[in-house]
Amino acid sequence: MKNLLLKHSSLLVIATGSFSFFLLNIVLRDFLKNFDYSLYSIFVTYLSLLISFGLLGTDYTFIRISDYRENLFFTNINFLKVIFSIIFIFSFIYTFIIWKIYFYNYNIFYILIITFITLINLLTYNILRLKSKFFLSQLINNFWRFSLLIIVLFFYLFKVEFSFRLILEILFFIFVITLLINFSYLKKLKLSNLEPHVNLISLSLQHLIANFILSAMNFFDRFIVERNFGMLELANYFFLSNIFLYPFFIFQNYIGFKEVVYFKKEITVNILKAKILKISLFSILFSVILFLFCFVIDYLGLYKLNTANNINIIILMLILGIIRNIYSILSGAGSALANPSFVKKLNLNSTLLLFSLLIPYYFNFSVELVLLSFISIWLIRVFIMFFLVKKEILLKTLT
């Protein structure tokens, strides 16, 4: 039993972080005013976007070219310097943009520090992954989630009045603690220079485009809802998505984070198909259980979820969650096989998908039609990714 827990300790941290975030969004929905809750939803979306492409694709290239063996971390030192330069320069750029659009009434220094540390966390997270320290990597990745939940619940006991300003201040102090943890680890790292066999800038650019497209597919729906239906509708949409869509991220994060390491060692078309079938069946079963669980809670009056009034949105969110889970397997395989040619093909095939997102953005569709458009886009993306990965596997077996 002990060995089993140690083997899956990283999954336990992912589950704890995701469950903490799940509870946090429920708790804050009751504690914050609607407008403040909408600001909170935008800010956590901003953090997610930073994690997706804040390092401009260099983090994915970093994983691709780096290795850890014999207590030494092998990577290209000059490229690592480029990553640190991006962290310092773009922290200011990202902060100014998000502050100017949404948070001009709040302390820009807090947002800057949180942005900077989020990018540092991303680098440390990937270093730990390459060292197969999955538990520590996920601990750093999820630290702010369960820390914020604990502090919010503690403040609630003392009847502290909540606002987005208070949440921002709490996050600032949590991220400062995370920075100290990062530095204590990074300063012990022993580096050895490794000359790459690919064009690092070109590969990073391709990854940046790919992740920008994927991030738009993951998060652009929130901005569409906010633009077309207002901040109050965004609060409801964000609340529902965190109950019926976010739980899937527990598995998506774990799949992408572990399968890329597995696929780098062994990958065939049959293995890929078997994993897709397995995750598909699991995701369908999970979505049914999640819906029934929430329906019973609502029906018994334990917590007001308004499942009857939002049934169409809920079902569409569950379908979207299933499709994203399937994609996470393909994403792990794609990351393991990635080369400039592969990423370029994926980007070219996905460009039209990115432009198609402008249709629901500029037209006042219903929330259901917005979700349907995203489901269609994700299905197309899954098929594109599958055929590209399959082709890359077959080419690999011939060499």
Image (cartoon, rainbow, N blue to C red):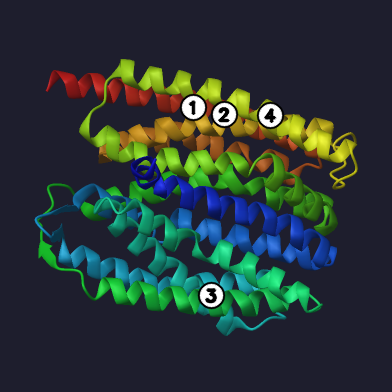
Q: Quadrant of the N terminus?
A: top left
Q: Which residue is mark 1?
A: 382
Q: Residue at x 59, y 29 (%)?
A: 322
- Label 2 and label 1: CA atoms lie apart by 8 Å
Q: Which mark is residue 188?
A: none
Q: Which residue is mark 4?
A: 289
Q: Residue at x 62, y 24 (%)?
A: 285
Q: Contact (CB < 8 A) between labels 2 and 1?
A: yes
**Residue farthest along the front direction in this orientation:** 1
Q: Quadrant of the C terminus?
A: top left
Q: Earlier in the sequence, mark 3 or mark 1?
A: 3
Q: Residue at x 61, y 34 (%)?
A: 321
- Label 4 and label 3: CA atoms lie apart by 34 Å
Q: Which residue is mark 2?
A: 323
- Label 3 and label 1: CA atoms lie apart by 37 Å
Q: Which type of secondary structure does the marked residue at label 3 adopt?
A: helix
**Residue farthest along the top direction in this orientation:** 270
Eye-nearest disc, 3 or 1: 3
- Label 1 and label 4: CA atoms lie apart by 24 Å
* Amino acid residing under circle 4: Ile
Q: Quadrant of residue 271?
A: top left
Q: Earlier in the sequence, mark 2 or mark 1?
A: 2
Rendered view: 374 above or below 31 = above
* Amino acid residing under circle 2: Ile
Q: Residue at x 26, y 23 (%)?
A: 393
Eye-nearest disc, 4 or 3: 4
Q: Earlier in the sequence, mark 1 or mark 4?
A: 4
Q: Which residue is mark 3?
A: 174
Q: Which type of secondary structure does the marked residue at label 1 adopt?
A: helix
Asked whether residue 120 is in view, the answer is yes
- Label 2 and label 3: CA atoms lie apart by 33 Å
